[in-house]
């Protein structure tokens, strides 16, 4: 369903707390005409965030008429190419990495590299690679969230375990838990993508971010020995019995009770898992988080952090106002406001932003801002083309159940790579 929100805002006094940086710079520009924005933030909380951003931007520019069209998130995915081609808005939100590549390649997104010059490039450094194609930047990020290992701190303490910094400790922790009839990890692979999270981390820790992205871009054969090493590392966990049984029967939510009940000690998942774990009764004294540990000490740590973005369609009519809006979106002040716990409840990309007073968001911000020198991936089904992602994730799930099928799985993935790219 498409809904419309129109804001023709009169001049209002701008809050002094939001009057610095890009806010002040945007405010100094005299903007007029109409600014059309298309958004997929259709759920109530994100929609309120989007409307609040537009209201604050509109306060700075009383002569600018802003029209927001909100489209259901799933419908947006099927409509974006059509509206970028036939009747483009001035600003549209989307995703980083390979998900923006088709529209860049088709000439439908504007090069906004000029916005990334100077201080902004430093403040948004963690996602610059994910916004870059052909050496140019094609949009700006407004929010992301960390992945990592969420674990039962009380169970680790009970069995004398500490957060692992390396692969050997990771496995020895697992064995101790198994010796005490506790599965190391819960997971539900019914919808495939959860297995992709494991592949992402194991491959980035084994072969590094650049290799991982080259694989996702179809530049590496799936039968390459380096890929096989990733699966060999994964098999060590599978053969130990690290994962809950029958995981193909569960969605990611249906796998949560194993951790809540203490039958499994940890979950490799995005930060969105924290809320349902808390709601199920786990306290912050019982829950904690650690960064997936190093496997190959010769590769720098890289992270999965799916990033949501704003872009200027190449057919936009008011590119001056669109550029000012993107600059406003990326400011430290705005990203602090929109990612607060009572807003998106996620992480600001701008390293100068403040993070909501939540221990998991603070830890995630520290990891992504200061301890992901290898780079930030977008998650397998965003980094690889949709058709390749589907075939690969089916293979990941099959491997977790039947690891002896690896050679057949990799041959199938390699045939798909040759057909798709």
Image (tube, grey):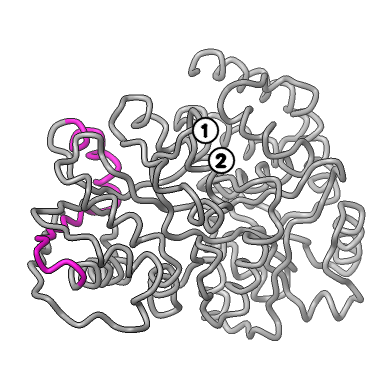
Q: Is residue 78 within the magenta segment?
A: yes
User: Residue visible at 15% across and 51% down?
Assistant: 36
Residue 321 in picture, x, y percent from top left? 21, 53
Image quadrant in which you'd find residue 53: bottom left
Q: Position of residue 46 (x, y in %)?
A: 32, 66
Name the residue located 67 percent from the left edge and 47 percent from the top edge. 198
Horizontal placement of 414 versus 164: left or right? left
Front residue (pair 276, 57): 57
Q: At 56% from the left edge and 64% from the top edge, which residue is drawn?
A: 351
Q: Which residues are magenta?
A: 60-85
**What percent of the width, then of the height, locates residue 114?**
40, 43
Q: Residue at x 84, y 46 (%)?
A: 295
Q: According to the image, label 1 marks what residue?
A: 384
Relative to the observer, which residue lies in front, 84 or 122? 122
Q: Could you say where residue 69 lies in the image, as x and y percent from the top left? A: 16, 55
Circles 1, 2 touching at the beta carbon (< 8 Å): yes
The crowd level at tag 1 (other Cα within 10 Å; few <14, some 14-19, many 20+) is: many
In the picture of the structure, the residue carrying the numbered disc 2 is 380
Which residue is at the front of the view, 323 or 140? 323
Locate the N terminus and report the quarter of the image it occupies.
Answer: bottom left
Looking at the rendered structure, which numbered label has been put on residue 126?
none
Residue 252 counted in the magenta span: no
- The secondary structure type at the circle numbered 1 is loop
In depth, the one of 240 and 296 nearer the eye is: 296
- Quarter assignment of residue 314: top left
Inter-mark Cα distance, 1 to 2: 6 Å
Left/right placement of residue 366 relative to residue 93 reads right
Crowding at label 2, few (<14), some or many (≥20) Cα neighbours within 10 Å?
many
């Amino acid at each position: 369903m498409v809904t419309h929100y129109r804001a023709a805002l009169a001049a209002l006094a701008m809050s002094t707390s939001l009057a610095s940086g890009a806010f002040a710079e945007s405010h100094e520009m005299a903007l007029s005409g109409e600014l059309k924005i298309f958004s997929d933030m259709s759920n109530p909380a994100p929609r309120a965030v989007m409307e609040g951003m537009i209201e604050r931007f509109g306060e700075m520019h009383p002569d600018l008429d802003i029209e927001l069209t909100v489209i259901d998130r799933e419908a947006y995915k099927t409509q974006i190419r059509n509206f970028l081609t036939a009747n483009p808005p001035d600003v549209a939100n989307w995703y980083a990495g390979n998900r923006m590549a088709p529209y860049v390649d088709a000439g439908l997104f504007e090069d906004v590299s000029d916005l990334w010059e100077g201080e902004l490039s430093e403040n948004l450094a963690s996602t610059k690679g994910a916004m870059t194609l052909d050496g140019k930047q094609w949009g700006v990020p407004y929010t992301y969230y960390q992945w990592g290992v969420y674990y039962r701190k009380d169970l680790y303490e009970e069995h004398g375990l500490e957060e692992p910094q390396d692969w050997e400790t990771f496995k020895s922790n697992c064995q101790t838990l198994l010796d005490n009839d506790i599965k190391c990890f819960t997971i539900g692979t019914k919808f495939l993508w959860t297995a992709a999270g494991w592949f992402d981390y194991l491959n980035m820790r084994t072969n590094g971010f650049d290799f991982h992205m080259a694989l996702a871009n179809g530049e590496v054969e799936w039968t390459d020995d380096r890929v096989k090493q990733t699966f060999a590392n994964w098999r060590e966990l599978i053969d130990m019995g690290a994962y809950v049984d029958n995981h193909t029967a569960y969605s990611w939510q249906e796998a949560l009770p194993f951790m809540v009940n203490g039958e499994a000690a940890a979950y490799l998942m995005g930060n969105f898992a924290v809320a349902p774990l808390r709601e199920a009764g786990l306290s912050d004294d019982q829950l904690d988080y650690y960064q997936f540990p190093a496997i190959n000490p010769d590769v720098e740590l890289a992270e999965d952090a799916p990033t949501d973005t704003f872009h200027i369609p190449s057919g936009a009519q008011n590119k001056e106002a669109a550029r000012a809006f993107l600059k406003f979106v990326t400011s430290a002040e705005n990203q602090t406001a929109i990612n607060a716990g009572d807003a998106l409840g996620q992480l600001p990309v701008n390293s100068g932003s403040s993070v909501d007073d939540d221990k998991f968001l603070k830890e995630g911000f520290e990891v992504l801002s200061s301890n992901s020198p290898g780079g930030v991936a977008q998650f397998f089904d965003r980094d690889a083309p949709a058709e390749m992602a589907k075939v690969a994730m089916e293979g990941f799930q099959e491997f977790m159940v039947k690891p002896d099928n690896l050679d057949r799985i990799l041959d199938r993935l390699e045939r798909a790579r040759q057909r798709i790219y």
